Image: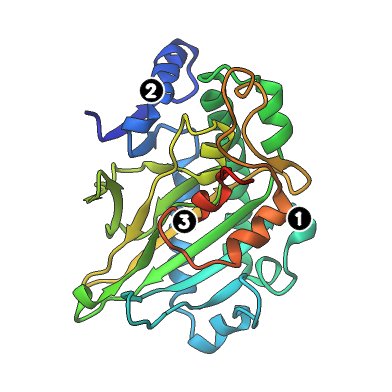
């Protein structure tokens, strides 16, 4: 069984048939790594540099972007102590970056100019990349291209930069609690070359070995819902080590705020819907009102017999 897929020269027409085969069998592929993805390597390296420079700033500088009470956007530690859960050992910086009118004025607009400009350029490139992926994934299931474009083109986009400091007792902590992403697609950039991502398959945690210059693509809950369970979102976690910090950046691509999250209507003509329908605005509120816990939110989205 194939555990990991990687594709090169993503959008050359001669490879389209193989992409359709790959995507239609995505349930047996835990992680997709994209190489020769079309994003300029100098831009990627510049972004890596700027992110690492951000974490060299004094703490008081970084705290200008801190998470406000009752909010989920901003910079801060999300270290959680509980009886039944390992400690989350990470500093995170989460921002909604698209649509522009949803941006918090004290976050992205106030970043150091070099980081902000580089990030804006990178986000624009990945928006195009994600849209191409959405179309390929949908067409592999015979979902109309127009349906996907209406949902995801210029959709909600968010970024999470995560700094995992070294820990002298890494077995006592977890970098990031096991979960599946609530997004449609997540594109992950390994910033400083330190690995720590693991994915779950058949109850076993498997480390992801990053290919040089690759983006890692995770399928999120929205895509599993849209496909009515034909695709499966990926449960994953992050680990830490005792020697060196790890830095990663995830870009989350979602439907438009005004769109509805639910199974594609073209798929439920021949099968019963597994998941309920919900406005994206409500979906976001519901997702962030809950703690990360495996694929529990996806279970919440399932239609129960008494629904």
Q: For the residues carrying marks 1 and 3, which lies nearer the camera in this image?
A: 3
Residue 9 is at least partly visible in this image: no
Quarter occupied by residue 73: bottom right
- List x then y, in percent, for residue 39: 50, 38
- List x then y, in percent, for residue 291: 50, 68
Colouring scheme, one of rainbow, by chain, secondary structure, one colour: rainbow
Question: What residue appears at the point 60 percent right and 33 percent down from the top-left corner?
Answer: 131
Q: Which residue is mark 3?
A: 296
Tag shown at residue 192: none
CA–CA distance in space, label 2 to label 3 = 27 Å
Asked if the residue under mark 3 is in contact with the one under mark 2, i.e. CB atoms within 8 Å, the reply is: no
Q: Which residue is mark 2?
A: 22
Residue 101 is at least partly visible in this image: yes
201 is higher (above) or lower (below) than 272: below
Q: Nearer the viewer, residue 247 or 183?
A: 183
* Local SS, label 3: helix
- List x then y, in percent, for residue 298: 51, 49
Q: For the residues carrying marks 1 and 2, which lies nearer the camera in this image?
A: 2
* Local SS, label 1: helix
Number of other residues with Cα within 10 Å of mark 2, as a class: few under 14, some 14 to 19, many 20 or more: some
């Amino acid at each position: 069984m194939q555990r990991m897929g990687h594709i090169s020269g993503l959008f050359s027409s001669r490879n389209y048939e193989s992409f359709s085969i790959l995507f239609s069998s995505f349930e047996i592929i835990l992680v997709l790594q994209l190489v020769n993805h079309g994003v300029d390597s100098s831009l990627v390296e510049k972004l890596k540099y700027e992110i690492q420079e951000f974490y060299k700033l004094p703490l008081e500088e970084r705290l200008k972007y801190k998470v406000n009470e009752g909010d989920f956007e901003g910079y801060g530690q999300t270290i959680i102590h509980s009886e039944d859960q390992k400690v989350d050992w990470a500093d995170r910086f989460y921002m909604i970056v698209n649509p522009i009118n949803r941006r918090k004025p004290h976050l992205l607009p106030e970043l150091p100019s070099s980081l902000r400009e580089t990030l804006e350029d990178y986000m624009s490139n990945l928006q195009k990349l994600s849209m191409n992926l959405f179309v390929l994934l949908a067409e592999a299931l015979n979902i109309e291209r127009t349906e996907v474009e209406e949902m995801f083109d210029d959709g909600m986009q968010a970024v999470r930069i995560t700094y995992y400091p070294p820990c002298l007792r890494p077995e006592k902590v977890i970098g990031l609690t096991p979960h599946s992403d609530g997004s449609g697609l997540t594109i992950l950039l390994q910033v400083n070359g330190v690995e720590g991502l693991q994915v779950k398959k058949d109850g076993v945690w498997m480390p992801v070995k990053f290919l040089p210059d690759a983006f890692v693509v995770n399928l999120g809950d929205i895509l599993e819902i849209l496909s009515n369970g034909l695709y499966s979102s990926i449960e994953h976690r992050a680990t830490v080590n005792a020697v060196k910090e790890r830095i990663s950046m995830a870009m989350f691509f979602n439907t438009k705020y005004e769109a509805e999250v639910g199974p594609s209507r073209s798929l439920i003509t021949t099968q019963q819907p597994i998941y309920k329908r919900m406005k994206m605005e409500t979906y976001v509120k519901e997702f962030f009102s809950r703690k990360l816990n495996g694929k529990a939110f996806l279970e919440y989205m399932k239609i129960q017999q008494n629904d």
